[in-house]
Amino acid sequence: MKLTLAKIAAGALLSVGLATAAHAQTIRVAHVDPDEWTASKKGAAAHIFKNIVEGETDLTVELFPAGALGNEDELIAQAQDNVTQVVLVSGAMSKVCSAASVLDIPYTFSSATIAWDVLDGEFGSALSAHCLEQTGLRTLAYGETGFRNFTNNTREIRKPEDMEGLKFRVQPIPLYLELVNGLGGEPTPIAWTELPNALSTGVVDGQENPVGVIYNNGLHKLQKYMTLDGHVYAADFILISDEFFQSLSPAEQAVVQRAARIAGNMGRSIQQWSTAEGVNKVQEEGMQVYSPTAEEISAFAAKAQPAVIEYLRGELGDDAEWIDRLQAAVANASQ
């Protein structure tokens, strides 16, 4: 009888162990971008992550692209509940970790390489640790959504004064209202899905987005002019539920972290390629593209930064220190 009971107990423990292992062996990865890896930065990053993790561990990775599991806000909530283990998000991160909003201070990064140095260095590590405390989500790596640029249908924009009197569609985010107001334009919050119609009917004169987004969504067909001012550098966050991460073995954690770093760099590469290709294509299709000089960018920054920084200091409270920490990191990376 004792032997039978022992066997029963052992069998029960084995069943629990197998159930736990089965749970830990699947990583659900979700994002809102297309799955096409040759043109989608999050799509490419997700596929690279999957291939590396599955190739070097016994973990299985399931991909859910194109908003299959919801929008970015919903994906973050799922990751916090450990329903979806890994999510790739951009703007929604600042809603759950307000310090991340400092990355949207206009004209902070003069180039992508400086942004990479800052995010992959001490500042990025510190921000990751801070957001982990705030959210329970670990930032495995940073990817890239790209620099945002202005387009419009009225005139070429070379200086802030050229923005005056023009209505620009912006995301319904206060920071972007402050940005366009500071430059002398008229910000108009409009949902993404309504943007093409707003441009076609003249509700707004222009909009702002990364080049790849502009080209891939045909916005260049509705706009005559683009100015490559790069007013905001948008980063992607590759996040994992820390509850799930801690359930992995040290060896699995190491592979997951390395896979995410490579995935982030792949996303950056795809975004850089999409931008370069996009600029050429919109010009070939008749759009006029202007690249401001360093002096002209400085004039834009002088107009836009003070209003946004003042707004953020009021909103962030104690977290306003992250403004100064970012500026110091950028200054150091720019030397």
Image: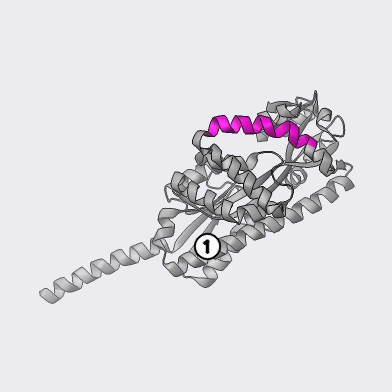
**Where does residue 180 sit, x and y in percent of width and height?**
72, 30
Q: How many neighbours does mark 1 have within 10 angstroms: few (below 14), some (14-19), or many (20 or more)?
A: some
Q: Nearer the viewer, residue 84 or 207?
A: 207
Q: Is residue 93 above or below residue 317?
A: below
Q: Residue furthest left?
A: 1
Q: Is residue 268 left or right of residue 165?
A: left
Q: Is residue 218 magenta?
A: no
**Where does residue 282 sit, x and y in percent of width and height?**
84, 45
Q: Is residue 86 above or below residue 4?
A: above
Q: What residue is drawn where x is 66% and y is 35%?
A: 192
Q: What residue is drawn where x is 28% and y is 69%?
A: 14
**Where does residue 154 sit, x and y in percent of width and height?**
86, 29
Q: What residue is drawn where x is 63% and y is 33%?
A: 309
Q: Please tell me whether the stretch drawn in magenta is mainly helix, strand or loop.
A: helix
- Chain part drawn in magenta: 299-316
Q: Is residue 87 left or right of residue 112?
A: left
Q: Is residue 40 visible?
A: no
Q: Residue furthest bottom?
A: 3
At mark 1, the secondary structure is helix
Q: Is residue 136 visible?
A: yes
Q: Nearer the viewer, residue 165 or 17?
A: 165
**Where does residue 330 sit, x and y in percent of width and height?**
66, 48
Q: Is residue 300 magenta?
A: yes
- Within the image, what quadrant is residue 179 found in? top right
Q: Residue furthest top?
A: 165
Scheme by which the image is coloured: one colour
Q: What residue is drawn where x is 15% and y is 74%?
A: 4
Q: Quadrant of the N terminus?
A: bottom left
Question: The residue under label 1 is which amino acid type?
Answer: Gln
Q: Which residue is mark 1?
A: 257
Q: How many marks?
A: 1
